[in-house]
Image (cartoon, helix red, strand yellow):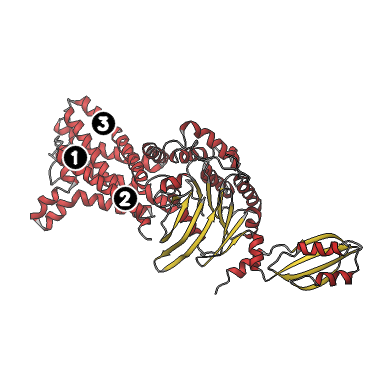
Amino acid sequence: MIEVRGLQKSYDSFQALKGIDFTVNRGEIVGFLGPNGAGKTTTMKILTGYMPQTSGTVTIDGMDINTRSLECRARMGYLPESTPLYPDMLVYDYLRYVATVRGVQSDLIKQRIKAACEMCGIVDRIGQEIGTLSKGYKQRVGLAQALIHDPDVLILDEPTSGLDPNQIVEIRNLIKRLGERRTIILSTHNLPEVMATCSRILIVHQGRLVADGSAAEIELRQADTQRLKVLVVGGDPGQVEAALASLPTVLGTERVPASEAGAVAIELSAAKNQDLRPLVFAKVVENGWQLIGLERDHLDLEGLFRKLTREV
Amino acid sequence: MATATPQIPQAPSTAPTLGKPSAVRTTLAITRRELGFFFNSPIAYIVIALFLVVCGAMLFIFDLPEGGTFFQNNEASLRALFGPTSPNDFGGIPLLLAFLIPALTMRLLSEEKRTGTIELLVTWPVTDTQIVLGKYLAGLVFVAVMLLFTVPLALMVGGLGKLDLGLVVGGYLGLFFVGASYLGLGLMASSWTKNQIVAFLVGVTFCAFFYFVDGMVGAVWADARNFFAGLSIKTHSQNIARGVVDIRDLVFYLSLISLSVVVTVQSLMARNWKK
């Protein structure tokens, strides 16, 4: 759906993008992550055709973003970082304007405005002046604007920045719903947001892509060790610990207080390169014990993010 | 065609929602929105009010170029409205418009740049030319409305004595073209800055320059005056105020308009120059 190859962008002497490659498939919600100034917004501005790249190619559905700009732009919805809107227009007038300029068929315009407003939860604000809306509602009008022509691709630059926690959850849920049948790229430096909404994460740092994959994949690839918590009944604590310690790649074991009576709780740390869970399960079964809990440590995306984007 | 692999649900294509792209429809949508802004903002009404007050004063109170006031001369003529009649006249409405029109155009692009809405606008499937033309057209409609407001003045004069209809039509046509030229210059100034005041002052400077250019150059280099007279809005509006609609005047206005519109489009496209 979206293919980015060798994307570079220089502003005068500053090289904002130093060669980025990625492909986004239809129906993916991709989180674009990185510290401020990493190149997120620059990439989005190039994807949306706002400014040209220095080198490299971007194609949307096989169409080159530079040579078939209008067709590409027609398929995309874009919400820029600052949600620029016209404060003195009514929500309805604004959406009708966007729909007309975007070339939505005249007889479908009302229907599309209604659909976009319902999706974004702004039906009751439709007659209000945009300038008098709260920040959360402005953000939703911005999203409605991006959706008005029912695009295949949505590009959202920090869609939840500056919103309060309730609004963030609402926008997040909205994005998830939108992602059911669209391709979405959203940028953020809010990690929980990525965990909550995105099926895939791209981490950029200093103009380069430093990680690409699901949160779990990135963690597995990048973290030094993995930690597992195993809860077993029917075995002697010492035997259980010894059995688990004998598994390949295990670096250490630790007996921890079990939350359930009669159970043995062991924490394992192991090299990151292999998922240990099937082996643990097999080992427990082999010894005639019962496995009642097996939990991999919650992904520490935050630590990972810091590690990947440390200044060098 | 049967496939073994499960199909990923496809997002429906946007094709049914989007009609055939129409440059005219897009441009007119932009025009309509700008007109909405014009008539919702106080500036538009201040400009119209000021315009009418000065028009009335020029017509009925001030001395006419040929000497004497309207009532002393006892002649039903709108000439005082349509512009200077000799090189020594300071100028009538054409000079006033050099200050009023940049006040209308100053917002057109600078405000979009300041608030960042331009970033959305240019990522919609709209060409930069459509954006500029849409805004320019809105200005033209506004100028036409402004001139329509002076029709009661014309009717009043017509009630006092017989008006030369050809002169009146020619005069209005001339004023319209003068306004249209200032619109182009003002829009161009607005495309260069995020600051409306800067856009206004630069716009006035350009309009006044093209109004006075032959006089200014002529004052220091008399031989060049005739050449620069061809570039002067004052000279061209003199012809029209005298009731002569010359094709050369129209060519001049149309060239000035096209040039400023092209420069404006280029200035929007400038974001694509730095790669």
Q: Is A115 left or right of B72, judged from the image as shown?
A: right
Determine which residue is flagged by label 1.
Answer: B250
Secondary structure of residue under mark 1? helix
Q: Could you say which quadrant of the image residue A235 lies in?
A: bottom right
**Mark 3 element type:** helix
Residue for point 56% across, 48% down: A26
Look at the image and tell me whether residue A161 can be seen: no
Residue A118 seen in the current view:
yes
Q: Which mark is residue B153?
A: 3
Q: Which residue is mark 2?
A: B264
Chain of the residue under label 2: B
Q: CA distance from mark 1 to mark 2?
A: 21 Å
Confirm or deny contact between disc 3 and disc 1 (CB under 8 A): no
Query: Which amino acid type corresponds to the residue marked 2 in the rendered image?
Result: Thr
Q: Could you tell me which chain the residue with mark 1 belongs to?
A: B
Provide the secondary structure element on which disc 2 rests.
helix
Asked whether A270 or A301 is in front, the reply is A270
The disc labelled 3 sits on which kind of residue?
Answer: Leu
Disc 3 with disc 1 on a shared chain: yes
Q: Disc 2 or 3, which lies upstream in sequence?
A: 3
Q: Residue at x 19, y 46 (%)?
A: B233
